Image: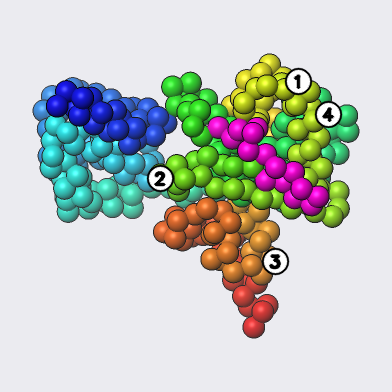
Amino acid sequence: MEHLLRERAIVLGSAIDPSSHVTYNSHLQSYLTFCKIHSFAIDPTPDTLSFYVVFMCHHIQPRSVGQYLSGIANQLEHLFPDVRANRNSALVSRTLTGCTKRLGSAIRRKEPLAIDDLQGFLQAMPQPMHDDLLFLAILACGFFGLHRLGELTWPDRVQARDWRKVIMHSSVRLDNSTFRYSLPAHKADRFFEGSTIIIAQREGAVDPCSIFTRYLASRDHQFPISPALWLKLDGNVPSRSWFLSRLHAHLSQSFGRHSLRSGRATYFATQGWPDDRIQALGRWTSEAFRMYIRKNPVILQALLHARTAST
């Protein structure tokens, strides 16, 4: 029995991604602080949660409060089994809807990258050093592979880093006109089955195969036995802030971590690709892709324009 209890505790701990666990803990701390300030019991009743929604919506964007409630429910469910039902109660839902209408503001979406932007980076680095080659390779793979930035870089918070999600050098395969590597896990891959990313050679100034092989040659020379594919000159896996600081050295703050993914999705849409094919390439779940399209009007407009042109 003791062994079963131990193993169950281990697998329950593995059910939540380390980065999600850190985020959920932060959400729980905000709830506990709220209860302490207002002398509420920590029991997450519909009444208490609705007051928490009102409180938080005056400090952060209402669209983020729903995520806070989900994190609180996850962390308190073992103590208060009714917390999810309370979180989805009519009182809490209507309170959040009212706060969103009253206090919400428009979302500023980051601009999608274009091929011309990638060409601009190449021209700005005529004699790239190792870290320049690394940045260009991540940029090219993120764009042509429809990656989330978090799949190619480490989180800035050390406690959220997970070696199970790091792309390994041993998975790389080079062919005459393509290269491929294994993405061990991603946001839509709940069971760590992984995906194989294949990126093809492209004619013109921006060829992802050429960019990748130049980085790979430098990486293999500097770190012949290190396991990770993406490595800075100091031997560390690049962080998200490291990549974004280099991105913003050449582009404005209107571009961000979603610009690579939305840029390639927009490119595919303008070329007339059907949305189900873009969804499959980008490793979106059906519902996530519908939300992504709704929240990125540039991609939606490109899809509609391509469909109109084909009729």
Q: Which residue bears the numbered disc 2?
A: 190
- N-term-proximal mark, 4 vs 3: 4
The disc labelled 3 sits on which kind of residue?
Gln
Q: Secondary structure at mark 4?
A: loop
Q: Secondary structure at mark 1?
A: helix
Horizontal side of residue 182 vs 222, given as left or right = left
Label 1 Cα neighbours within 10 Å, binned few <14 / some 14-19 / many ≥20 = some
Residue 83 visible in rendering: yes
Q: Position of residue 90 (x, y in %)?
A: 17, 53
The disc labelled 2 sits on which kind of residue?
Arg
- N-term-proximal mark, 1 vs 4: 4
Q: Nearer the viewer, residue 288 or 252?
A: 288
Identify the residue at horizontal 63%, vertical 78% (top origin): 308
Q: Position of residue 262 (x, y in %)?
A: 60, 52
Highlighted range, magenta = 166-180
Q: Quadrant of residue 6?
A: top left
The disc labelled 4 sits on which kind of residue?
Pro
Residue 128's tag is: 4
- N-term-proximal mark, 2 vs 4: 4
Q: Which residue bears the numbered disc 1?
A: 222
Residue 244 visible in rendering: no
Discs 1, 4 touching: Cβ within 8 Å: no
